[in-house]
Amino acid sequence: MDFYAILLLHLAVTLIYFLGNSWRKPRLQVVTETVIALAIPFFGVLLMVSYRLCCLLLALNGGRQAEAEQEGEAFFQGTHLNADIIPLNDAFLVDDVQKKRQFFTGAIKQAVVDNESILQMAMHDRDREIAYYAVALLTARMEKLENELFSRETMMVSGEGQENVPRLEEYAQLLKNYLAQEKFIDHVTYAKKQGDYIGLLDYLKKACPDKMEYYIEEIDHLLATKNYVEAELVCAELKERFPENEESYMMYIRLYQSWRKPRQLQQKIRELKACPIELSQEALRAIRYWDKDGHRQEEAIHG
């Protein structure tokens, strides 16, 4: 057999190996193995086949496909992803108007868009159809919330469930969800509902004195309405009920920051620093930011 016949045979064997390997392996791996097989006449193919058999028999690949073979598959869910599926938050970057409209209107019609910021963006989109459906969904949500609130308020006015704490808690959650839509509520209605919410929180705080969240939520809304005197009274109740909790100090700090009372704020900073409890990162940041005594000491050190 002459040299050219051997060369053609070698090329044919390498080609067969390439074709048999290419349909189920990543492109880079196929090219690399083919180059090795081509560089070592005959023995290259034998070497790669032996390597494959060893990997198979010893389970060196752990029974898993190479990383590149899993393209289009979410590793944490095992879910195959379609190339046409993109996050709604990124759909604003799509240049194709029809495709972007399809993404949004399809999701909104099925009421699967829960992210408020996405709906806000959709409302101001230049495409009128997208903006229309976003507004329609938000309007429907507000109507549903208002109907639920009206039904619950009617029940309360009639005397049903006034002493039923679980029902009152459900009503409080409804009010909280409603107030979270402040941008879509007229200021008069919002102020009325916020007042109702503060009153309900005050009642629940007395009915369930061990639930700190009622104290904190009431203080937050009292600060929002600039009712600092009432907020200070609730802070005192919180401190009395939970003396060993950092929130008792943090709410005072928020109050005096909003109220612009630096002397009282510094007093609470000193109390927080002296408190023998493990402080969170938020509390430590507040101390570093507001602690004037600490700043003076640093200035004295650095002179």
Image (cartoon, rainbow, N blue to C red):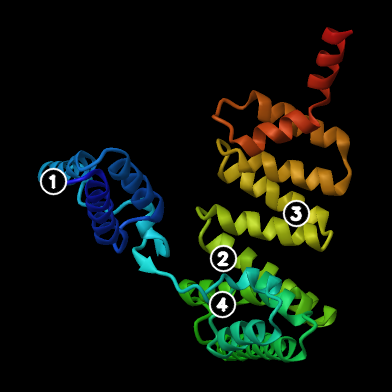
122, above or below 128, in the image: above
Q: Quadrant of residue 249?
A: top right
Instruction: Identify the secondary structure beneath mark 3.
Output: helix
- Marks 1 and 2 in Cβ contact (< 8 Å): no
- Amino acid on which disc 3 is placed: Ala
Q: Along the polypeptide, which appears first: circle 4 or circle 1?
A: 1
- Marks 4 and 1 in Cβ contact (< 8 Å): no
- Amino acid on which disc 2 is placed: Leu
Instruction: Return the residue at label 4.
Output: 171
Work out whether residue 178 or residue 303 is closer to the camera in this orientation and state it.
303
Q: Position of residue 185 (x, y in %)?
A: 77, 81
Single out the mark in the foreground, 4 or 1.
1
Instruction: Identify the secondary structure beneath mark 4.
Output: helix
Instruction: Return the residue at label 3.
Output: 231
Q: Position of residue 158 (x, y in %)?
A: 57, 91
- Amino acid on which disc 4 is placed: Tyr
The total number of labels drawn is: 4
Instruction: Return the residue at label 1.
Output: 53
Instruction: Return the residue at label 2.
Output: 204
| Disc 4/disc 1 C-alpha distance (Å) | 67 Å
Q: Along the polypeptide, which appears first: circle 4 or circle 3?
A: 4
| Disc 3/disc 2 C-alpha distance (Å) | 16 Å
